[in-house]
């Protein structure tokens, strides 16, 4: 079904800077991508997954009849071109089959985060008009069973798990069996003809944004929206047929779906699905990937664990670790300046690499040659650290509405503190208020059933308002300074960008999460979720009991220690930017409590509301 675009109102787009990533890719479709990848690659391990304690694989040749029978099975249960099909599942090979089964049937799929509670799915299913829902297991099946009376459009629930959990109409195996019964040469030819007849502007998917207020909006992405992003990103990141990736970010998010799903498949990369987020460290050692796509939170945890292990060492081992870190930091500076470290520095780095960094890289499997970071800002200090130890992390930038990539650092041209240069076909304009606007084949066709929101987001001449504040350098590197909605305006009229300050604080080993508060207040404060393991060790040295974590939140010595540690990151800030007080929170922010989006970004306004008592107390103390 073709995507329609609502009329767009006139919006002022005079800009301070304009940049273009070059020619746009030739329009295409995701069904074309599928057939081209199958024709180009013939690997026995196109997909990999772990079950029953061992890894299994599926070849490119096996994928074709599997996808075809999924498509024919959907037709057998009443599916038609233009239908919407929801996928509620963790990453697994069945997700791949369900997705391409829909796309090659000219249907649009609606991915749903498996972490969402049942009540938040009602709007998504009803607004999208999903008639079929794929669920991964009994847990997800129970959610749909709970809300099914409220979703009259849902005709069929199909489970990846076998036997079928309660509330499920049939299993994927049964759906494939129905498809196999229809899989005659004539029907197979008709299926391929339907798939190849899909047009670039046809709707491929509806992705519902998490949003901090109001109901989620369905982002309409066409086949070419995503195809163009794959075509422009692939030559930049250089994925190859001899590469392996570990897929663990949710496929329901456009970042993993474009980069870890379509782009990897197009390049012939072996895609291995992690068992879970918790199993990622073990799966890294088993799969030994060469490519990785992740969000900053994962890199932050890796960095914290490496630094904790180094600090926990004693004697000579500890001295060697921190000597190596110092050498690597100097070498990273040379590399980023375009120089090759040599002489004594080169010899020192070779020794540091042999004694320390090679062992660190082994924890990722020892073969990782490139990683991509997206979804949220990555701390420059953490980015430099990974480059220093020989793990290039290419930070990029985009949104669900932009399919998603707008810009990304090239593996051999990384500029820390930026999100890199624009990809092909993408234009960027910096508006007078600093907001980043973008135009090109990557921009969505609008919000489903929401013309008003579409007109507000996209100008008549196609510029999409990202809601981010940024700068574009003369040589084309884009820098994000903050979210427009996150900019804090103090009561004195000062504008503060909290994200760079928060990112600096999160590099401290005593900090897990940090959120700056201060909009319409006289001064900013900061809420801190401590790294309780490290705080407990420090308390042990000081003889402070740790059996009651709630009591530690207000313990004078703990507060003083955390104020001192957090304050180290405030050096160089203007007085009006510097948080005057910190408050400690007992638990990490979670998706379930609504404090995090599914891509693990903090919802600042939700945190502000949920912890109003803590915030009010801090301001009252300072006033007193």
Image (cartoon, grey):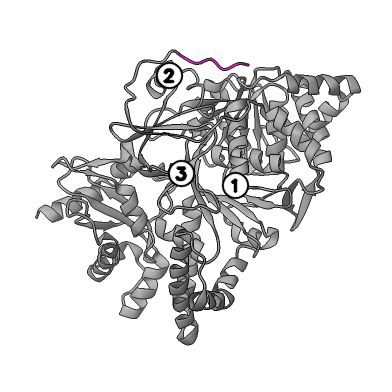
**Residue 592 badge:** 3
Judge whether residue 119 can be spotted in this image.
no
Nearest the viewer among 35 and 534 is: 35
Of the numbered discs 3 and 1, the one sitting upstream in the chain is: 1
Percent x, y for residue 86? 61, 29
Q: Name the outermost residue toward the bottom.
A: 315
Percent x, y for residue 134? 66, 32
How far separated are the C-alphas under marks 1 and 2?
A: 30 Å
Disc 3 versus disc 1: nearer the observer = 1
Judged by its main secondary structure, the magenta piece is loop
Quadrant in which the C terminus is drawn: bottom left
Disc 2 versus disc 3: nearer the observer = 2
Relative height, residue 548 to residue 348 (above, below): above
Q: Are marks 3 and 1 in contact (CB under 8 Å)?
A: no
| Residue at which label 1 appears | 237
Q: Are marks 1 and 2 in contact (CB under 8 Å)?
A: no
Residue drawn at x 23%, y 49% as measured from the top left: 615
Of the numbered discs 1 and 2, the one sitting upstream in the chain is: 1
**Quadrant of the image occupied by residue 175:** top right
Instruction: Judge the density around disc 3: few (<14), some (14-19), many (≥20) Cα neighbours within 10 Å.
Output: few
Instruction: Judge the density around disc 2: few (<14), some (14-19), many (≥20) Cα neighbours within 10 Å.
Output: few
Nearest the viewer among 439 and 526 is: 439
| Residue at which label 2 appears | 461
Percent x, y for residue 300? 46, 58
How far separated are the C-alphas under marks 2 and 3?
A: 39 Å
Instruction: Judge the density around disc 1: few (<14), some (14-19), many (≥20) Cα neighbours within 10 Å.
Output: many
Task: Determine whether the residue tagged by mark 3 lies in a helix, strand or loop.
Answer: loop
Percent x, y for residue 52? 75, 55
Nearest the viewer among 97 and 34 is: 34
């Amino acid at each position: 079904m073709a995507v329609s675009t609502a009329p767009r109102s006139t919006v002022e787009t005079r800009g301070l800077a304009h940049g273009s990533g070059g020619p746009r890719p030739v329009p295409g479709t995701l069904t074309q991508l599928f057939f081209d990848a199958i024709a180009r690659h013939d690997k026995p391990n196109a997909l990999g997954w772990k079950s029953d304690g061992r890894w299994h694989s599926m070849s490119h040749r096996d994928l074709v009849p599997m996808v075809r029978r999924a498509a024919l099975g959907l037709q057998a249960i009443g599916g038609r071109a233009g239908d919407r099909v929801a996928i509620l599942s963790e990453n697994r090979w069945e997700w791949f089959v369900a997705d391409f089964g829909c796309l090659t049937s000219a249907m649009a799929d609606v991915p749903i985060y498996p972490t969402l509670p049942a009540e938040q799915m009602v709007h998504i299913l009803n607004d999208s008009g999903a008639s079929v829902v794929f669920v991964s297991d009994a847990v997800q099946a129970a959610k749909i069973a709970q809300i099914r009376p409220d979703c009259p459009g849902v005709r069929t629930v199909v489970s990846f798990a076998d036997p079928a959990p309660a509330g499920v109409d049939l299993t994927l195996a049964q759906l494939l069996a129905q498809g196999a019964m229809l899989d005659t040469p004539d029907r197979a030819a008709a299926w391929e003809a339907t798939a190849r007849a899909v047009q670039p502007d046809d709707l491929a998917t509806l992705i519902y944004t998490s949003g901090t207020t109001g109901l989620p909006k369905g982002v309409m992405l066409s086949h070419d929206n995503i195809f163009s992003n794959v075509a422009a990103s692939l030559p930049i990141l250089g994925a190859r047929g001899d590469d392996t990736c570990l897929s663990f970010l949710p496929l329901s998010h456009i970042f993993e779906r474009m980069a870890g799903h379509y782009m990897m498949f197009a390049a012939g990369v072996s895609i291995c699905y992690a068992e879970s987020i918790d199993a990622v460290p073990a799966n890294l050692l088993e799969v030994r990937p060469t490519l990785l796509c992740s969000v900053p939170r994962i890199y932050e945890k890796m960095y914290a664990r490496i630094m904790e292990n180094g600090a926990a060492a004693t004697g000579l081992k500890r001295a060697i670790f921190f000597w190596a870190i110092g050498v690597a930091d100097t070498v990273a500076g040379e590399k980023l300046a375009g120089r090759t470290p040599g002489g004594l520095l080169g010899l020192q780095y070779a020794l540091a690499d042999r004694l320390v960094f090679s062992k660190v890289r082994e924890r990722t499997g020892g073969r990782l040659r490139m990683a991509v970071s997206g979804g949220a800002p990555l701390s420059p200090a953490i980015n430099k650290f990974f480059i220093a130890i020989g793990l290039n992390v290419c930070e990029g930038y985009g949104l669900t509405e932009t399919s998603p990539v707008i810009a990304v650092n090239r593996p051999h041209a990384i500029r820390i503190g930026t999100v890199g240069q624009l990809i092909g076909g993408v234009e960027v304009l910096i508006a007078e208020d600093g907001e980043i606007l973008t135009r090109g084949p990557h921009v969505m066709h609008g919000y489903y059933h929401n013309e008003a929101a579409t007109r507000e987001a996209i100008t008549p001449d196609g510029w999409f308002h990202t809601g981010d504040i940024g700068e574009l350098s003369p040589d084309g590197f884009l820098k994000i300074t903050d979210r427009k909605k996150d900019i804090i305006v103090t009561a004195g009229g000062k504008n503060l960008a909290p994200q760079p300050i928060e990112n600096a604080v999160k590099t401290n080993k005593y900090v897990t999460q940090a959120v700056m508060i201060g909009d319409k207040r006289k001064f900013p404060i900061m809420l801190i979720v401590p790294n309780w393991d490290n705080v407990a060790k420090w308390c042990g040295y000081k003889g402070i009991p740790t059996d009651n974590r709630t009591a530690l939140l207000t313990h004078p010595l703990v507060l003083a220690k955390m104020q001192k540690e957090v304050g180290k990151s405030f050096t160089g800030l203007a007085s009006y930017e510097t948080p005057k007080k910190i408050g400690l929170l007992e638990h990490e922010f979670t998706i379930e409590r609504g404090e995090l989006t599914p891509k693990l970004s903090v919802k600042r306004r939700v945190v502000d509301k949920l912890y109003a008592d803590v915030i009010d107390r801090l301001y009252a103390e300072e006033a007193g």
